[in-house]
Amino acid sequence: MSREELEEKLRSLRAELFSIEAKLSVGVPPENISRRRQLKREIARVLTVMRERGMI
């Protein structure tokens, strides 16, 4: 993946995580609570790849 693709994926993952956490803070249970953990792991993976390639 190119730098732009990784950055776009990171943005979309963070936006989805923000949406889930906003629902939790208001007290509305999200459709899939386990998705929060999956998103955090995917974000960590993308950041790891970016660090390995020296993009950060």
Image (cartoon, rainbow, N blue to C red):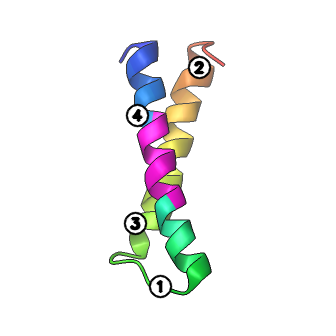
Q: Which residue is mark 4?
A: 9
Single out the mark in the foreground, 1 or 2. Answer: 1
Q: Which residue is mark 3?
A: 35
Magenta span dominant secondary structure:
helix
In the image, which disc is placed on residue 52? 2
Mark found first going from the N terminus, 4 or 3: 4
User: Label 4 vs label 1: CA separation?
Assistant: 26 Å
Q: How many marks?
A: 4
Quarter-wise, where is residue 50 in the image?
top right
Mark found first going from the N terminus, 4 or 1: 4
Name the amino acid, label 1: Val
Residue 43 higher or lower than 35, as above or below: above
Q: Residue at x 56, y 14 (%)?
A: 53
Mark found first going from the N terminus, 4 or 2: 4
Q: x%, y% of residue 13?
A: 44, 46
State which region is magenta. 10-18
Quarter-wise, where is residue 33 in the image?
bottom left
Name the amino acid, label 3: Arg
Name the amino acid, label 2: Glu
Mark found first going from the N terminus, 3 or 1: 1
Q: Secondary structure at mark 4?
A: helix
The furthest residue to the front: 26
Q: Secondary structure at mark 1?
A: loop
Q: Which residue is mark 1?
A: 28
User: Label 4 vs label 2: CA separation?
Assistant: 17 Å
- Does residue 17 show up magenta in the picture? yes
